[in-house]
Image (spheres, grey):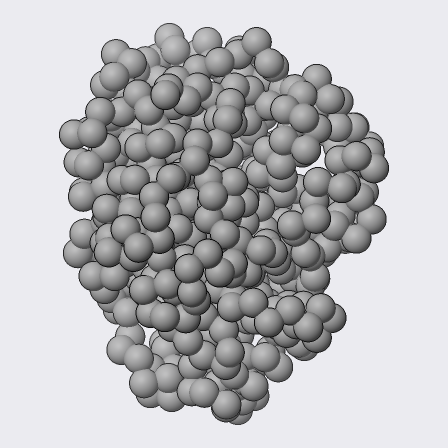
Amino acid sequence: MDILYTNTRDASEKVTASRAILNGLAKNGGLYVPVSIPKLNITVEALAEMTYQETAYEVMSRFLTDFTEEELKHCINSAYDSKFDTEEIAPLKKADQAYYLELFHGATIAFKDMALSILPHLLITAARKNHVKNDIVILTATSGDTGKAALAGFADVKGTKIIVFYPKNGVSPIQEKQMVTQKGENTYVVGINGNFDQAQTGVKQMFSDPELAKEMEAAGYQFSSANSINIGRLVPQIVYYVYAYAKMYANGAIGKDEAINVVVPTGNFGNILAAFYAKNMGIPIHKLICASNENKVLYDFFQTGTYDKNREFMLTSSPSMDILISSNLERLIYRIAGDDAKKNASFMGELAKEGKYTLTPGMREQLDSFYGNYTSEAETAAVIKEIYEKTGYVLDTHTAVAAEVYKKYKAETKDTAKTVIASTASPFKFTRSVMNAIDEKYDAMSDFELVDELSKIANVKVPKAIEEIRNAKVLHDTVCEVEDMPKTVKTILKIQ
Ligand SMILES: *Cc1c(COP(=O)(O)O)cnc(C)c1O
């Protein structure tokens, strides 16, 4: 069966998967969603035998129905190869009564690699299928990890340019160094004097600016997105939840048809939405546990049914979750509004105008598979220390938010279902915060002294991604104001 994609703000728009990936975001600001979520219909015994790549093919072929088997397998095999430092691609590690799904074994040591190592291949294939002649300009807003993963994925990919906007004072030192040292003729990195929400809103505005689109077209360019607003980011993220479930079964951690919980440290709501899609494909997931840091807009949303971004933006030790406008929540709102684009568009209109909206009781009822909670900065640091001292396993600051929220969930509900925690980054990416959490004495060390010290205490080799930037030259130093983002793009593309 062919799966088409519709626009969350315009029911009349229906496009193929490849077109949805090419467009990234719909012209009116809506997101593409599959008109229905396909069922996986594969036994757990069969899934348990599959490699990551085979699982990826089974999941993705059900969504990307206008890609041929050969095209899709080529994309998968080009993405999930020796760029990952383990053949398993996404290993499961048991520590302290939970199963950590390590999603940080790719080129940039954050979970963004899981989707961004395949997105360039999907996009190039989609461009070919749709006879696109323009060069594709990937516009990306990053809270720290998407930027580097997208840069690594698109560097020197023919027919593309990539421009990344990041909050100049809102990412970790290692994250910034990874981005500003990026090589590749077609890569551009720009710091903005603003936060992630402003970067993301600025990028979304450029997508829906008809004047800019005309100027781009005249110069032989068109935009696409590497953010999780692109359905081509979301679909590859479903794979690892299916894979984790199958591995739990294969390892004997769960029996046949036994449901698991999934805990996801959340920012833009992309990763947890992928878990929700996995559940809808038929994977037995009991609770989807949404973990937030002090930017707890999602916790409040699940508590009250009101989404309210009118609050102070906090800079935390888990910067990739410092987000108040969780873009992918729109896909869930659309769904619980009964796939009603008009109703969804009116909520999103309220969000743009008032900064908030409130669900109807009928919509709230459909959120019962979600549980939300959050952690303070002190709790995040404490759980890193606690788990390290208990088990020797070192969590990064984002995964730590999830670990602490899982503790709160267990204490509150007494639920004993086996639980997978999405481990979204290597601790080496957030070395200073992680090491300070373990012992304040580390504060005196330089960033790279901390890297070596972490390697020692965790008994883990320094990842290649970190060795690469140790002595790398800074190649990007552009900084701009939020309102100058379009001007900066035009200067980069030489279209003014
Ligand atoms: C991006 C990111 C998150 C948040 O993921 P969303 O899909 O935006 O919810 C969490 N942790 C890390 C390390 C990230 O890079």
Q: Is residue 225 left or right of residue 331?
A: left
Instruction: Report x, y in % for residue 346.
Output: 75, 22
Q: For this rendering, which residue is in front, 14 or 450?
A: 14
Q: Is residue 364 left or right of residue 161?
A: right
Q: In this orientation, does residue 30 appear? A: yes
Instruction: Report x, y in % for residue 464.
Output: 24, 66
State which quadrant residue 349 falls in: top right
Identify the residue shown where x is 22% and y is 24%: 68
Q: Establish if 72 lies above or below 216.
A: below
The N terminus: image quadrant: top left
Identify the residue shown where x is 25% and y is 17%: 129
Q: Establish if 105 lies above or below 444.
A: above
Identify the residue shown where x is 71% and y is 68%: 413
The C terminus: image quadrant: top left
Identify the residue shown where x is 33% and y is 24%: 65
Q: For this rendering, which residue is in front, 159 or 40?
A: 40
Total label count?
Answer: 0
Q: In this orientation, does residue 472 appear? A: no
Q: For this rendering, which residue is in front, 228 or 272?
A: 272
Q: Is residue 325 left or right of residue 182?
A: right
Q: For this rendering, which residue is in front, 493 or 14?
A: 14
Instruction: Report x, y in % for residue 173.
Output: 46, 64
State which quadrant residue 364 falls in: top right
> Seen from this angle, which residue lies furthest front?
256
Instruction: Report x, y in % for residue 101.
Output: 41, 64
